[in-house]
Image (cartoon, rainbow, N blue to C red):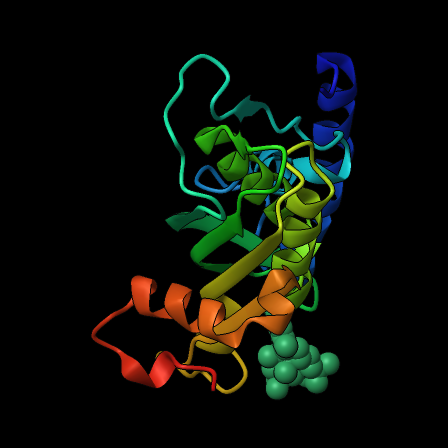
């Protein structure tokens, strides 16, 4: 984690530059309403990019069948849906916000990931300048390379990009959907479609084949 000393220095240095930007934009950075803004912006930027300065959270795993004799289904499909995320588009440093869905097939070791740890991974890779396609790929790789050693992973992002919403083309409806597949999901299109149906059984157009 960042030390508070580093954090204070960073806030100070970034705030200095934000103050200059406010001036360049034509506002008075010393007026009452805005004089604390450079510090607030600096803190917000640091908060939204903490993933650049910290290491990836550990994915705690549990072994199915460790303490009981339940006959767990082989190749169990696990889907975490509707993980809300916000990230910063690397082209404009504006937020993109939406949902990430993560599916995986339990590997031969019978290990599963702690639910919250996957959300921590989503948050971690979101907390940096990003593009959505890289975000879903990094989450997929983090799970594939973790101790759960799944047979496959599928990560889907569904987000509104503020750089498209508030500026440029100003499209307020367009959402970007991106999917990263690893392992068995690369070969088994029926499995991919099963996940898509689970995510939205009412929207048949989500089918990829
Ligand atoms: N594929 C993808 N594109 C993104 C993402 N975030 C932003 N973009 C796009 O990245 C592109 C950057 O294009 P540029 O032409 O360099 O930027 P620009 O002049 O601001 O483009 P406009 O947005 O069209 O005004 C734009 O088309 C953005 O919509 C993302 O996560 N994935
Ligand atoms: Zn952008």
Pinpoint residue 203: horizontal percent, then vertical percent.
26, 78
> Image height check: is 45 above or below 164?
above
Near-viewer residue (48 or 183): 183
Q: Locate the N terminus and report the quarter of the image it occupies.
A: top right
**Residue at horizontal 70 percent and vertical 29 percent from the top:** 11
The correct choice, above or below, for 22 with respect to 41 in the image is below
User: Considering only vertical position in the picture, is 106 above or below 181?
Assistant: above
Query: Where is residue 136 shown, x and y percent of the image?
Result: 61, 59
Q: Residue at x 61, y 54 (%)?
A: 152
- Where residue 41 appears, as percent x and y from the top left, is 58, 41
Tell me where residue 79 appears, x and y as whole percent. Answer: 41, 49
Q: Residue at x 48, y 26 (%)?
A: 64
Up-down relation of residue 37 to residue 170 (above or below): above
* Residue drawn at (62%, 50%) of the image: 151
Could you tell me if residue 36 is visible in this image? Answer: no
Q: Quadrant of residue 17?
A: top right
Whether residue 109 is visible here, answered yes or no, is: yes
| Residue closest to the eye, 87 or 204 | 204
Q: Quadrant of ligand 1?
A: bottom right
């Amino acid at each position: 984690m960042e030390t508070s000393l580093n954090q204070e220095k960073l806030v100070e240095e970034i705030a200095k530059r934000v103050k200059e930007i406010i001036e360049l934009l034509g506002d008075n950075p010393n007026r009452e309403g805005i004089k604390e803004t450079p510090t607030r912006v600096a803190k917000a930027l640091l908060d939204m990019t903490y993933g650049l300065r910290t290491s990836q959270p550990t994915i705690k795993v549990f072994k199915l069948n460790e303490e009981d004799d339940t006959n767990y289904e082989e190749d169990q499909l696990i889907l975490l849906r509707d993980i809300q995320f916000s990230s910063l588009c690397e082209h404009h440093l504006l937020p993109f916000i939406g949902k990430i869905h993560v599916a995986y097939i339990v590997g031969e070791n019978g290990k599963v990931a702690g639910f919250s740890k996957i959300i921590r991974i989503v948050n971690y890779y979101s907390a940096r300048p990003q593009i959505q396609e890289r975000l879903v790929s990094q989450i997929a790789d983090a799970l594939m390379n973790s101790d759960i050693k799944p047979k496959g992973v599928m990560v889907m992002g569904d987000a509104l990009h503020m750089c498209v919403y508030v500026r440029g083309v100003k499209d307020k409806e367009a959402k970007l959907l991106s999917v990263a597949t690893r392992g068995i999901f690369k070969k088994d299109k029926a499995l991919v479609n099963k996940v898509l149906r689970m995510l939205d059984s009412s929207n048949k157009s989500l089918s990829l084949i």
